[in-house]
Amino acid sequence: MQTRSTCPYCGVGCGVIIESDGDQITGVRGDPDHPANFGRLCTKGSTLHLTASAAVTMQTRLLRPMRRAARGAAPEAVGWGDALDTAAGKFAQVIREHGPDAVGFYVSGQLLTEDYYVFNKLAKGLIGTNNIDTNSRLCMSSAVAGYKKTLGADAPPACYDDFQHTQCLFIAGSNTAWAHPILFRRIEDAKAANPGMKIIVADPRRTDTCEIADLHLALQPGTDVMLFHGMLHLMLWEGWTDAAYIAAHTSGFDALKAKVRDCTPDRVAQVCGIAKEDLLEAARLFATSAATLSLYCQGLNQSSSGTAKNAALVNLHLATGQIGKQGAGPFSLTGQPNAMGGREVGGLANLLSAHRDLGNAQHRAEVAALWGVPSVPEKPGKTAVEMFQAAADGEIRALWIACTNPAQSMPDQATVRRALQRCEFVVVQEAFSTTATCDYADLLLPATTWGEKDGTVTNSERRISRVRNAVARPGETRDDWVIANDFARRLERQLGRAGTLFPYADAESVWNEHRESTRGRDLDITGMSYAMLDAAPQQWPLREGDATGRARLYEDGVFPTPDGRARFADVAYKPVAEAREARYPFSLNTGRLRDQWHGMSRTGTLGRLFGHVPEPTVQMHPQDMARRQLKDGELVHVTSKRGSILLPVSASTDLGLSQAFVAMHWGGEYLSGRSSTGELLAGVNALTSPAFCPDSKQPELKHAAVKILKAEMPWSLLAVGWLPQDKILESREALRELMGAFPFASCVPFGDSGALQDGSPQRSGVLFRAAAYEAPPDAMLARIEALLGLDGHDSLRYADRKHGQRRTARLVRDGQDARLEAFLLGGDTRAEAWIKTLLQERLPAQSYGRQLLKPGAAAPAGVATRGKVVCSCFGVSQTAIADELATASGDEGQRLAALQGALKCGTNCGSCLPELKRMVRAPAMPALVLQP
Ligand code: SF4
């Protein structure tokens, strides 16, 4: 059976075709007819079906409602009626005793539009609070505020097709190659078709996106407004602005001109840390190209000046007339699959349905009339950071969290966890039982997820696509909108209201009401229907009577402002909120990995997606490491004013001096430990800052001032084992419980990527790493061994309690030889590289029995590390690529073709292509052989 649907990961919104046998999802491929991807999928999208296997579902999914009798107690299964009555009773009690603003809803950009709509109506229409916000606040609220401030409406004016028409692509604060891989494939195609097209990347890091750039502006963190103002200063000086466009279609240019007067090249070069020649070249290309398109994402949004950064970039488009035509315009990329849909229904604390504003009395009256309620509240609700602060302060007493994991993803985890503990009642509505936030729930409500639910999402280019269920809902799970709807009906009764607000029979009836709310608005979709969307995804606006939606906006130069003119924003440059200082000299940046998604509740179920970046590290520039006498792999304390974590350091010349980077995915589920005072250390967001943009309220996840100090931890542990598919995630969860016993611990899945050469089935396992000041009790190590299958009589053992040394290895017979199935190195892990290679490469291991048990044993001759996996589709390692390139000849294109011909890397999803091209360009490196 085949079902057309949409990928649930990023805002590209790729169409997928789900294959199923009726009960089980069996495969996924790109939808060749979907206009976002034309059949392509990236590493994440192409492995979606594996995340929905029966083995994964049984081990990770929340399948029935659960209730805790008391905090800290194990949750117990309850019926749906019981669960929802409990929730309605508790929320009604809090509302009666403390008012509607004593409750809050924290939802998600991964919900469908229909889910969002019901939650929004529940909070604002029934309860009478605007305390509903979403994890999209962490993702794109600065883009919303920036668009509204300048163009008058929250509407990205460009579309994906513009990549083919642009002559200058200006990518700011976006690692498109990793965060929006299928768009990057389209950019690569556009560049190949039009080699004259120029690409500029403005990013403090040299990311994979820079591989395609003609110019990389490695600006200092947070200095984007100064860069954009400096570009405008030069455009004015050189006469590159479009006076006719400015006069006909904009207002406020004189004030902006005055603002950028002192943003001279000298000043910009000094503040941003870039060359004046590069600044001039960027300004020239932007202003004088026939069509300039800018793409931007979290580098601009996740900032205490997020709105100013967005607006300053839009200023450049308005000043040069680079908007409202093919291949031009300011194009914000949404991180999440339905951040756009959430905005459309007004599912944020400061918005109302169909892009209406909470602060506008007429808008409030329109929404109240639509819903049939006397009024909707005027007072702005608490945004994400404010909501958890209010809960930590006791102001919000009941929280409903749906489809998101704030105990991983919110900044300043100490406050978030205090909030979750202090809240009288916490409901977590989730598909996965493994998220950190589930640990704080009084009530857990099991939700359906990708492949099981029905509705719509909107991607970055305003295109609405259908999401469809391919298989039956597992266990007792229910669709998110159904859960919210059933709760709302019960709450109506509890509050003594007439039960008429939530009459929906299915997702389509919810969507039809949302559609009606858009009538006459900028995003009018009154000409769309589910039937039309079933035939093909559509872009908004699509008004009644229109045959198709609009690809581009503002082609007539008329903007949705009172006078029809776009507004220049004379925003000021402000540095990052938390200045670096002598005690905290590094700027910590966070961002995505290529093969992972957010808190990894889904991608983290697949060992093969850990081949590219197997374990958490903090990246630093090699010179900063040398100055601190740090070597690759050594443990460091990374400390901000809010918290401290331990993790290994890795060298990277992609970063500037005094910068550090930790991937945003590493939460307490994968990286943890305990401080010397017993405090639990909980992932990267223990460090990040809650400082937010005053307009968009989006927090500054792209910068925190930190110090990085070597951790002297003499005892170390590495335990790795292949495990049966139906035990991996269970074992990982059990190992996760042990992480808090160590000052540092990480626990990740690992596995084969791609098809194996010998045709044997792909395997997966778990890797547990820890460090401590002294050896832990034997019972702890025995427990770890048991969870990795090292507790049987067939394991080889060595233990020296006095010196804290312990070795365990399990070899299994394989023909005439034996292969390593699992091992534990306790006390001294210097031999880990070659032992891990034996295990991962399934090398004959019979003759290494003694060496496996000897502390610090050197590598046997000729055992080469494979390095990380570069191509996840075909499991091609760094070493294999380097070996192949050592003999390849010709120019870069020919060497790449030879490499792909020999190893197939980069010939499927293409996510590794930028890295392959970098390796092709780099000087030849010898294969790394571990010397005996
Ligand atoms: Fe999914 Fe990848 Fe497409 Fe994003 S680019 S929607 S993650 S397949």
Image: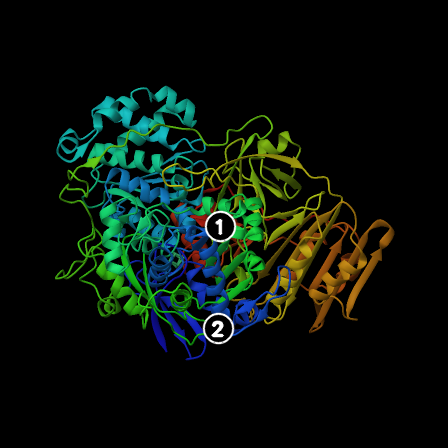
Horizontal and vertical percent for residue 478? 43, 71
Horizontal and vertical percent for residue 712? 73, 39
Between residues 221 and 198, which one lies in front from this camera angle? Answer: 221
Q: Is residue 521 above or below residue 231?
A: below
- SS at mark 1 in the image: loop
**Kind of residue at badge 1:** Ile
Q: In whole angstroms, how far apart are the C-alphas of marks 2 and 1?
A: 25 Å
| Of pointers 2 and 1, the one earlier in the residue sequence | 2
Q: Quadrant of the N terminus?
A: bottom left
The label on residue 396 is 1
The label on residue 415 is none
Horizontal and vertical percent for residue 682? 60, 48
Query: Would you say the beta carbon of the disc 1 residue lies within 8 angstroms of ligand 1?
Result: no
**Kind of residue at badge 2:** Trp
Ligand 1's image quarter is: bottom left
Direction from residue 532 to residue 608 in the image, left or right: right
Q: Is residue 646 above or below residue 629?
A: below
Between residues 318 and 375, which one lies in front from this camera angle? Answer: 375
Residue at mark 2 = 80
